[in-house]
Amino acid sequence: MDAFSLEGINRANAVVDFKEPAATPEETFDPKAVWLNAEHTRGLSIEDLSARLLPIVRDAGFQVTPEKMLAITPLIRERIKLLRDVLTAADFFFVDQLPPYDPVELIPQKGDAAMAVKVLTRAREVLAHTEFKHDPLDQALRAAAQELGLKAGQVFQPIRVAVCGRKNAPPLFETLEVLGREKLWHGSGMPSSNFVSDGLILAGQLSRFTPFFRGFLLHTLGVVGIRQRDFRVVVIAALLQLFLK
């Protein structure tokens, strides 16, 4: 106590503001309050946090069992700041079909659409016969990466995006384990309408457009003096939005 004095305290740092009514739900809470809530949330036990998240998920219309919510919770605990964030951080665990996402996200780092097609084709074959547990999934997909002559990250990214609809998602093997084979495959191990197959279709569409646009892009970027690597993905994404409607 002797090391501190009231005169040395900055009152501004202690203020937490709440806006009611707020223009958006995000504006309701002061960033400091959100940070504090996130720290409290991460300090809860998995069982306690799961029990708090379950009613929110069910109120949103998703029929989730307590057991499944308990399995999902440790994968998203570090990714949520407010309890309602579960609906965006873990949405792919609850839906039968992913909402539309940018197919460019399927392209691995230093790769192209053809590589994404190759990866997802092999992933579909491997996952059809792999036990959906962390270690077997890890071993099988890393072995697939070696077979394809690719880095592990180049294989994991297209699968992660095909399964979650985005790059920023929980760890891949744990996610696949919680989703389970029945989420990705229907019937006796034969691929049907599933997340991986849907991603493969999108990557295939992307690969068909790429050769046609390559010459156009190189010419256009050269004329305006812009480096290809800076705007390649942005331009392709814009063109895809136009032609895939």
Image (tube, rainbow, N blue to C red):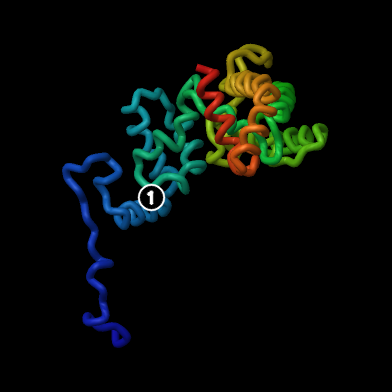
Q: Residue at x 75, y 38 (%)?
A: 142
Q: Position of residue 152 (x, y in %)?
A: 72, 40
Among all residues in the image, which is located at the extreme bottom?
Answer: 2
Q: Position of residue 156 (x, y in %)?
A: 66, 36
In the rendered image, the vertical position of residue 117 relative to residue 142, given as above or below: above
**Residue with the mark numbered 1:** 41
Q: Position of residue 213 (x, y in %)?
A: 65, 25
State which quarter of the image contains the N terminus.
bottom left
Horizontal side of residue 198 vs 100, given as left or right: right
Horizontal side of residue 92 vs 212, given as left or right: left
Camera-side residue of 58 and 234:
234
SS class of the residue under badge 1?
A: helix
In the rendered image, the vertical position of residue 27 relative to residue 17, given as above or below: above
Q: Is residue 102 visible?
A: yes
Hey, which quadrant is residue 136 in on the image? top right
Q: Residue at x 32, y 54 (%)?
A: 31
Q: Position of residue 132 (x, y in %)?
A: 65, 30
Hey, which quadrant is residue 113 in on the image? top right
Q: Is residue 126 visible?
A: no
Horizontal side of residue 175 vs 120, given as left or right: left
